[in-house]
Amino acid sequence: MIELRTITKVYKTKNGELTAVDNVNLSIEKGEIYGIIGYSGAGKSTMIRLLNGLEKPTTGSVIVNQEEISAISGGKLRAARQKISMIFQHFNLLWSRTVEENIAFPLEIAGVPKQERTKRVAELIDLVGLTGRGKAYPSQLSGGQKQRVGIARALANNPEVLLCDEATSALDPETTDSILELLLDINKRLGLTIVLITHEMHVIRKICHRVAVMEAGKVVETGKVLEVFQNPQAPITKRFVSQVSGTNETRESIEQILENYPSGKLVKVTFVGQATEQPVISQLIKEHGVDVNIVHGSISYTTSGPYGTLIVHIDGTEEQVQTALHVLAKHELQTEVIEHA
Amino acid sequence: MLSQLFPNVNWEKMTEALYETVYMTAVSTIITFILGLAIGIVLFLTSPYQLWANKIVYFLTGSLVNIFRSIPFIVLIILLIPFTKFLVGSIRGANAALPALIIGAAPFYARMVLIALREIDKGVIEAARSMGAKTSTIIFKVLMPESLPALISGITVTAVALVGYTAMAGIIGAGGLGNLAYLEGFQRNRSDVTLMATILILLVVFIIQYIGDFITAKIDKR
C-alpha cells in the first residue's frame, strides 16, 4: 500500500545542511494502523508529509496506492491527495466556516455537486458523533470535537489512506482515548490504512498494529507493537516502552531494594497474551519456598493482546533462587535479572 | 436656523461637493480594494516558503509598493498629471482625481493585505493543500475568507485615508469638499464654509468607520 524506498530528505539552512530523514525504508500494508514514534526533531513530521507530497524527498521514492507520489506534481498530485487525507495536531479547521462547511470543503475541491455534498456531510457528521453540531463554528467546539470535524473532513472523499500528524497531542488523556477509539473504529469499518506519528507510546499501544521508532532521521527499530513492547532493542525504544509500563518511576524503588537486600535476585518478568493469566508467582512461593516481593507491576492492552510487566524480588538460598528462575523460564516468560537500576 | 449659523454657505454647492467627495472616495476605495488585494496576494504568495515563493517577483513588487507608498500624496498628484491627462483627458473634475487616489492608496492597502494574510494559520493552508486544493481555490476559499475581518478593517482605514486624500486632490481642482473649503472658505475668508465642509468630511469618515467596524464584528467567528 505504502512503500518508502531509500528516502533521504535534506534541508538547506543558513547553518548548512540538515538531514531530516536519513535513508529510510518502510513498507505499510493495506488496512494497517502504522505508528511512527519519535521525539520532536526526529524527522517524523517530514516523513508523514512525504506521503502526500507536501514534502519531496531529496533522494528515494515514495509510493502510495501504486502511485509514485514523489514523482508526480500538478493535477495528478492533487488528484492523488484526495485519496490520502490528513488530520492535524492543531486541527487546522477554517474558522470562517461552520462544521458542515468545513466538512464540505474537500468535497468542493473534488467538484462534488451541492446536493450530494449535503448528503455526504450529514453522513459524516453522524459517523464522527457530532450530530446536531453542524451549524456551529469551530470556535464553539471543544478540542475533541474539533478533531472529530477534522476526521470527518478527512474522510469526505473516501480516502484510502489517513495520515495523522500528532492528532491527539493537543488533547487531554480522556479525549485522546475517545479520538483513538474513533480512529480504530474507522479503520475496522472502512478498512482504511492509517499512518500516524506521535511522541506518545500510549497512542502506539492503544491502536497501532506495527510501529517504527525514529531517532535523528533514522528508523532505528520496526516491528509488531506487541513484540516491540515485549522485547525492545534500541535504547530509545526501551525509553518509550518504559513511558507506558511505568518502569521509569520505579527506578528509585529498584535502587532502594538493591541496596537493602544484597541477597536474592531482582527480576523483571514480561508476560504476553495467555501467560498473563497464569498464577506463576504463587506457584513459586508454594512449591519452591522462595520469598517473592512485588516491586512493580502493570498490564497494558494492545490491539493484539494484553502485555504485562512485573518486577519482583526473589529471596531464598542460592539454589532456591536459581530453581525459581528456571521455573519462570519454563513458563515461556521473558525474565531479566536486574543487577542495577 | 442653519442659514443664520452658516450665512455664506451655498447649500447647493455644498451638496454637490459632498456628492463629489463621496463619489471619489467610493470609486477609489473599490478599485483600491481590488488592486491592493491582488498586489497583496502576489506579495504573500511570492514571499519565502509560500506557494509561489519567488525572490525576484517578491522583491520587485515589494519595491514598487514601497516607492509609491513613500511619495507624499500631494507630490504624487503632480507627478501623475501627464498620466492623468492621458487616461482621463483632463486634470480637472472628480474623475481626474481617481488615478492619483488609487495609485496612492493601493500600495498602502497592499501592505495591509500582506499583514492580514500572514496572520492566517499556516496549518490551514497546509490542510487545504493536503486535500488537493488548487492555488486559486486556496486564494478564494482559504486566504480571503480566513483573513476577511482584517481585510475589511484594512479597507476601512484606507477609505478614511482616501477621504483625506480627496480633500488634498480638491486643492488642485478635483472638486469635492476639500476644494470647496479651500476656494470658498479659505481664499474668500469665509470660515463658516470651511467649518461646514469640515463637519461634512467628519460625518463621512464616521459613517465609513461605523460601517467598517460593524461588518468586521459581524463576520468574525473566531
Image: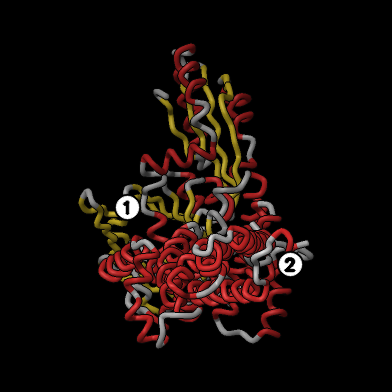
In the rendered image, the vertical position of residue B209 relative to residue A329, given as above or below:
below
Residue topped by disc 1: A217
Residue topped by disc 2: A134
Where in the figure is residue A151, as x and y percent of width and height?
Answer: 61, 64
- The residue under the point 54% across, 40% down is A244
Mark 2 or mark 1: name the one nearer the start of the chain.
Answer: 2
Where in the figure is residue A309, as x and y percent of width and height?
Answer: 54, 36
Where in the figure is residue A16, as x and y percent of width and height?
Answer: 20, 51
Q: Which mark is residue A277?
A: none
- The residue under the point 34% across, 60% down is B70
Quarter of the C terminus of chain B within the rendering: bottom right
Q: Residues within 10 Å of mark 2 (few under 14, many from 20)?
A: some
- The residue under the point 40% across, 24% down is A339
| Front of the two marks 2 and 1 | 2
Q: Is residue B138 visible?
A: no
Image-based side of A268 in relation to A158, left or right: left
Return the chain for callout 2: A
Q: Amino acid at mark 2?
A: Gly
Q: Amino acid at mark 1?
A: Gly
Name the residue nearer the viewer: A288 or A276: A276
User: Mark 2 and mark 1, same subunit?
Assistant: yes
Image-based side of A25 in relation to A337, left or right: left
